[in-house]
Image (cartoon, grey):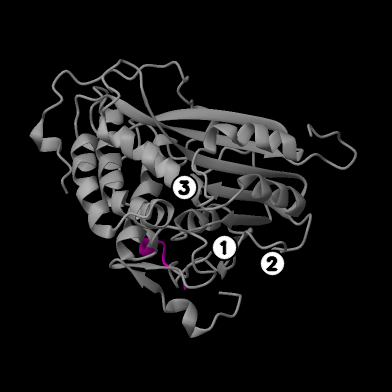
């Protein structure tokens, strides 16, 4: 029997006066023009972060080993990032960061008693499990290339080893109420194809939603100069990803792609996520502190395959290069942040015109 305590979230507090039971209407995204005030004392050392339903054979669990990391065996090479325990832990932390950034909510689409939910690229499955708990009468399916999800899950949740790049998915067309994606930059050659396929598999009136990092680094007050090592790494990573045909800069295009695919009632919310604890606001400072850990823990994972296969770098060259990148990432005198885009849209009812 499923025990909720087996899937407790990390102890990152929600904003004051808000808990997960609050209605979605209580959440407001930052305006893109909003300015986050930096802390006047950025060098506080105390805040440093140095720190299945589809049959699969055993070979699926015999991961490919490269550079001391492991990668998925099924459809090997499709996803350029690791699937080992350190990366799973980082993914769980990333999930909690976004949960706090979104003030406790897991979705923005106006769901009403959904019967079938699909989570593409489910990762460790935390989102799917929480949705299964929230909607106990709904069938929640999470798909991924790696079987890294827990065995003990709610009875209405299942995980399937599947590749969303495949022409046909393991579900019936016009069958799902809601399809969800989160932080899948670099996972596909053309994310527009995932949107088009989702449109096909949604029932009329069903919703799709994507919650996505924009890989570009932003700064509002001029503290990030052209020589900033973390921004330079971001540009290098983007170049490597484009060479491999795995574009990273998709978040700001999602709304347009949804509309081109035929979705209506398309909405977009944009949030700012500091790269470290430079903000003065306690909530943003906390988010930045955890995000710094998230980024530091992920830098090697984000770099190895892309830089080796996309740029021809050696592992030693990558490790030497990342030394200065890590130092720059933790510099609280640079007030940089990423943008998080949330986009959701509805498949038109039968006979209702679409936007395509």
* In the image, residue 228 lies in the stretch drawn in magenta: no
What's the mark number on residue 241? 3
Q: CA distance from mark 2 to mark 3?
A: 28 Å
The secondary structure type at the circle numbered 2 is loop
The residue under label 1 is 143
Q: What residue is at 10 percent from the left and 36 percent from the top?
A: 46
- 256, above or below 160, in the image: above
Residue 146 position within the rendered picture, expressed as x and y whole percent measured from the top left: 47, 67
Rendering quarter of residue 91: bottom left
The answer to whether 240 appears left or right of 190 in the picture is: left
Q: What residue is at 74 percent from the left and 40 percent from the top?
A: 261
N-terminal-most mark, 1 or 2: 1
Q: Are marks 1 and 2 in contact (CB under 8 Å)?
A: yes
- Magenta residues span 1-6
- The one of 301 and 284 positioned closer to us in this rendering: 301
The secondary structure type at the circle numbered 3 is helix
Q: What residue is at 30 percent from the left and 44 percent from the top?
A: 295
- The one of 246 and 114 positioned closer to us in this rendering: 246
């Amino acid at each position: 029997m499923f025990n909720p305590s087996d899937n407790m979230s990390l102890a990152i507090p929600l904003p004051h006066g808000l808990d997960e039971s609050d209605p979605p209407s209580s959440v407001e995204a930052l305006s893109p023009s909003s300015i986050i005030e930096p802390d006047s004392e950025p060098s506080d050392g105390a805040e440093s972060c140095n720190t299945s339903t589809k049959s699969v054979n055993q070979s699926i669990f015999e991961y490919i080993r490269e550079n001391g990391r492991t990668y998925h065996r099924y459809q090997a090479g499709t996803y350029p990032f690791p699937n080992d325990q350190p990366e799973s832990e980082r993914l769980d932390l990333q999930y909690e960061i976004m949960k706090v950034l979104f003030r406790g909510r897991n979705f923005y689409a106006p769901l009403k008693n959904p019967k079938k939910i699909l989570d593409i690229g489910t990762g460790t499955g935390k989102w799917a499990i929480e949705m299964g708990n929230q909607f106990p009468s709904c069938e929640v399916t999470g798909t991924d290339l790696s079987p890294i999800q827990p065995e003990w899950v709610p009875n209405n949740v299942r995980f399937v080893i599947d590749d969303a790049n495949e022409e046909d998915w393991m579900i019936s067309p016009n069958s799902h109420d809601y399809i969800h994606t989160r932080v899948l930059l670099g996972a596909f050659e053309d994310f527009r194809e995932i949107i088009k396929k989702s449109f096909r598999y949604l029932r009329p009136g069903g919703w799709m939603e994507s919650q996505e990092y924009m890989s570009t680094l932003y700064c509002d007050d001029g503290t990030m100069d052209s020589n900033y090592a973390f921004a330079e790494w971001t540009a290098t990573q983007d170049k490597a990803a484009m060479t491999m045909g795995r574009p990273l800069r998709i978040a700001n295009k999602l709304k347009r792609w949804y509309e081109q695919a035929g979705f209506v009632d398309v909405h977009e919310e944009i949030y700012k996520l500091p790269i470290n604890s430079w903000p003065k606001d306690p909530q943003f400072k906390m988010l930045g502190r955890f995000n710094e850990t998230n980024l530091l823990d992920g830098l090697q994972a984000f770099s190895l395959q892309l830089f080796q296969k996309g740029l021809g770098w050696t592992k030693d060259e990558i490790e030497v290069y990342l030394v200065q990148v890590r130092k720059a990432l933790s510099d609280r005198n640079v007030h940089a942040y990423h943008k998080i885009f949330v986009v959701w849209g509805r498949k038109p009812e039968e006979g209702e015109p679409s936007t395509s």
